[in-house]
Amino acid sequence: MATSAPQTNAGTGTTTLPTEWRDFFTLTKPRVMTLVIFTAICGVLAAPGSIHPVLGFTAILAISMGAGGSAALNHWWEADLDAGMKRTMNRPLPGGRMRREDARDFGIFLSGVSVVLMGVAIGWLAASLLLGAIIYYAVIYTMWLKPRTPQNIVIGGGAGAFPPLIGWVAVTGEITAMPILLFAIIFFWTPPHFWALALFVQSDYAKVGIPMLPVVAGEKPTRRQIMFYTLLLAPVAIAPWAIGGTSWIYGSVAVVLSALFVVLAMPVFTRMRAETDAMTPEKRLFKYSIVYLFVLFAALVADRVAAYQGLIA
Amino acid sequence: MTPEEELEFKRRRKARNWVVAGTLIFFVVLFYAITIVRIGDPG
């Protein structure tokens, strides 16, 4: 079980050398940040109304800093678990390149500054949502649910779903159906995305005792859940068009992308792992899920920009 | 601390100081820009 008390030498900072600034940057999970920044920008650009470029940039910066801060807190809390997994054992804390409390302080500082920056520059509704997202990821997901329930990914998906919602609210100052749908798209996208990954890195999670669905429930229920959430995702992704929030541009892209998602999830659902299995359908679904989200949100922005420019009805 | 370690210590400290300085300057400029925009905001 994850705990903040060091059980290994992860993050004990055996070196007397100061930590490289790059290691602090690594704490913010830059690769995850790419998706956060992208979806936040999409939320800002797709929202009706306008925002001064300086304030738009500040909103995206604050969201990114909040995501980076909560990621640093995740590194701090999970240092012992990271030390036991091949994928994460070279991170700054398990690698012994940083003191554990430095990661914690950096995370708290970055999170605090992000919320204040959002509140002062943009507004306190967006700042409250950002604070909620940070607490959701760092406390509810990382500390509480991830080590306790195999549904951790479903709940954790909520944390990653906040950026477009906050970006939208930063522009409009109110929560309406459209930003909630953007939240829902990422929420329902996360389980098939992450469980496809968990199927082919299953042994790592089993080693450190994280109750990932494939570990505790087995492959078959995981494959069934991937299909279930993929089928839920499709109507949610099409909903912005169905409720009249977008035009046919987004609608047609959402229909095609979601249909392909279902097609690629089918073999993952129906098959079982064989001896010396390359896990090709699972890896293909995982890669496609990333493309899916990027293209879907890009289509949303293209649709809305075209509408606001008067190019389409 | 060996001479090599001392050199590495100074290199890391210098690099971190530059990053902190750059970040501070960035935020000074950003807050100035935010202030100007907010002052000119009719809403």
Image (tube, coloured by chain):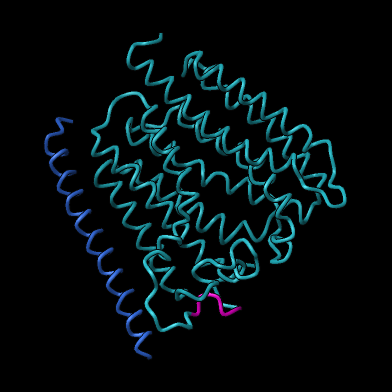
Chain colours: A cyan, B blue
Determine the image quadrant of residue A254. top right
Q: Residue at x 15, y 33 (%)?
A: B41
- Tell me residue A94's x, y (percent): 55, 72
Judged from this view, the residue extending furthest toward the front is: B4
Magenta segment includes A157: no
Q: Residue at x 45, y 37 (%)?
A: A39
Q: Quadrant of the N terminus of chain A?
A: bottom right
Q: Quadrant of the C terminus of chain A?
A: top left
Magenta segment range?
A8-12
Q: Is residue A20 left or right of residue A78?
A: left
- Tell me residue A235's x, y (percent): 62, 24
Judged from this view, the residue extending furthest toward the bottom is: B1
Q: Nearer the viewer, residue A274 or A98?
A: A274
Q: Residue at x 51, y 45 (%)?
A: A160
Q: Nearer the viewer, residue A294 or A214?
A: A294
Magenta segment includes A10: yes
Q: Nearer the viewer, residue A111 or B24?
A: B24
Give the vertical position of A258 relative to A134 (above or below). above
Judged from this view, the residue extending furthest toward the top is: A313
- Tell me residue A62's x, y (percent): 34, 48
Q: Is residue A131 left or right of residue B16?
A: right
Give the vertical position of A20 relative to A131 (above or below). below
- Tell me residue A297's x, y (percent): 48, 30
